[in-house]
Amino acid sequence: MVADSDFLQDLINRPTESLSIELKGWIDPNMPEGKDKIVRAAIAMRNHGGGYVLIGFHNDTGEPATDNIPSNVRSLFHQDNIQRMVSKYSSELFEVKVHFPTRDGIEFPVIEIGAGVKTPVVTKRLLKNSQGAVLFQENKVFIRSLEANNTPSTTEATWKDWPHIVEVCFDNREADIGGFVRRHLRTLPPELFRAISSLIPQRAPKEIEQTIPQGRREELGTLPPIPEKRTETMALEYLEEGATRFNTVVKERNLSVPDHGSWEVSAVIIGTVPSHSAIGSFLNLLDSSNPRYTGWPVWLDSRSFTKKEARPYVFQGAWEAFICDLSPEWGGKDLDFWRLDPSGKFYLRRALQDDLSESKRAPEPMKQLDFGLVILRTAEAIAVALGFARAMGCPIETTSLSFVFRWTKMKGRELSSWANIDRHMYPGNIAYQDDITSQVIVPLETPSSAIAEYVYPITKIVFEAFNGVEIGISVIEDLTHRLIERRL
């Protein structure tokens, strides 16, 4: 499964460079210079953990390039041509997909490089231009990295990049091993599980602990000690602070917003936070570190938006943005508010897609809640916030993040699967409470392959409010992994 059409359309409607998205002007992939750019970008994205290369855009402004548009875009960037080119120079064979979403009547090639790298990818042969000059040598490792002002670029790997490259490879290997262990642990009879549990030390290593299903960890006594209550209240306090700011901005701007439910998340770093301030490079750092798992990612950087009122600004030492677009110009309505505090606190409030979607399948506003969207949004928020904390330089082994999630205006809604037509939800499961709040603490060292284990307890509380519905951990793992691997 590859990226869906809505995601691809969002990519070219609002193109922004990040570590997982690279913008290139119009190039000729049959020329050495064009091959150089595509091969470098593909290898760099593969080593980073997957991403997209958008052709036909200025990387500084994100605007479409109007000069040198080829007349034969589809044949020039045919998938077989791009795949053959990358495979010729890459040390590892990996699949490359090419999509052609349309904007303003122009097809823009979007080259998709999948996740899953387990061995660093290097160039296996050199490439020269028509004059014989070397464009890149063999045995070169390309990586996505940040420049001095925290803007992303594709460069040759240096010693500073190798820890990240190795971490990505090990996370993917751990995902395979962890998935295998988790599948088999769940099928063990209780008495055999307890027998195995007794053989594991009281403080199991993280690598073992992350393979144990969330619902069975208490039997082992291996969960890390819960931090003091203050860390939990800090996240809840920041959630309320963010909600208050949202209401204040709505009043200040004299906005009239439609009745809607919302989901909110507050994430507070627990541990040592390196010094940062609310300057442009800090916003560059977090934006570049956002993996953009969806076309409208959490904590979306709106600096390139045409509407000035949607662009981020600094308020009381933190970046915040209020994005309110209720015209379906790009295929949907959007209502987002977020804050990014350099002290290590992040807040996001978003109107439910169930209430603002312009999809033909969308339900009547205020009537349903898609269970798959709940899982995906929770997983995305956790993954991105962890990425923010790592980008800020927080110590991996001694840092955690305290999360608080809240869903509002749930009363009377029915749990459904309108947005996930491949999955079925029996009708008639109604919520009788309006607000649902859930908390979890996630260690910063948690690999992406283990995020589902934290999504499970958060969403479990949500689904229970709908007539005691239980969604199995296997479903949550599948959706979470599809998100992380960009296979939605």
Image: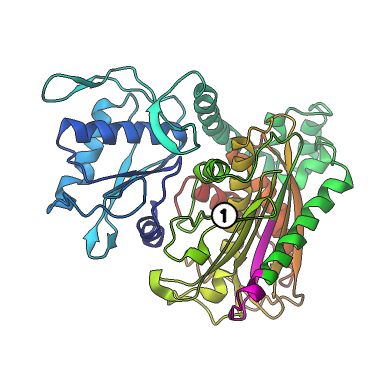
Q: Is residue 108 left or right of residue 50?
A: left
Residue occupying image coordinates x 69% and y 77%: 430
Q: Nearer the viewer, residue 28 or 244?
A: 244
Measured as percent of width and height from the top left, residue 83 is found at 25, 38
Q: Which quadrant holds residue 204?
A: top right
User: In the rendered view, would you say 6 is above or below 74?
Assistant: below
Of residue 462 and residue 243, the one placed in the foreground of this image is 243
Q: Nearer the viewer, residue 185 or 474?
A: 474
| Residue 304 locus on image (x, y percent) | 43, 56
Q: Which quarter of the picture shows residue 435?
A: bottom right
Identify the residue at image location x=77%, y=52%.
235
Q: Which residues are magenta?
A: 249-265
Q: How many marks on residues?
A: 1
Residue positioned 62% across, 36% down in the render:
390
Queried whether the magenta region covers residue 467, the answer comes back as no
According to the picture, the residue beneath numbered tag 1 turns out to be: 299
Is residue 384 among what the camera can see?
yes
Q: Do we see residue 426 in this rendering?
A: no
| x, y percent for residue 442 | 72, 43
Badge 1 crowding class, 10 Å Cα cut-off, few under 14, some 14 to 19, many 20 or more, is many
Image position of 96 (left or right of 381)? left
Residue 322 position in % (x across, y down): 58, 64
Q: Which SS class for mark 1?
A: loop
**Residue type, mark 1 in image:** Trp
Q: Is residue 425 left or right of residue 140?
A: right
Which residue is rendered at x = 20% and y = 46% of the image? 77
Closest to the observer, 94 or 141 = 141
Q: Is residue 41 above or below residue 362?
A: above
- Decide: is 400 above or below 406: above
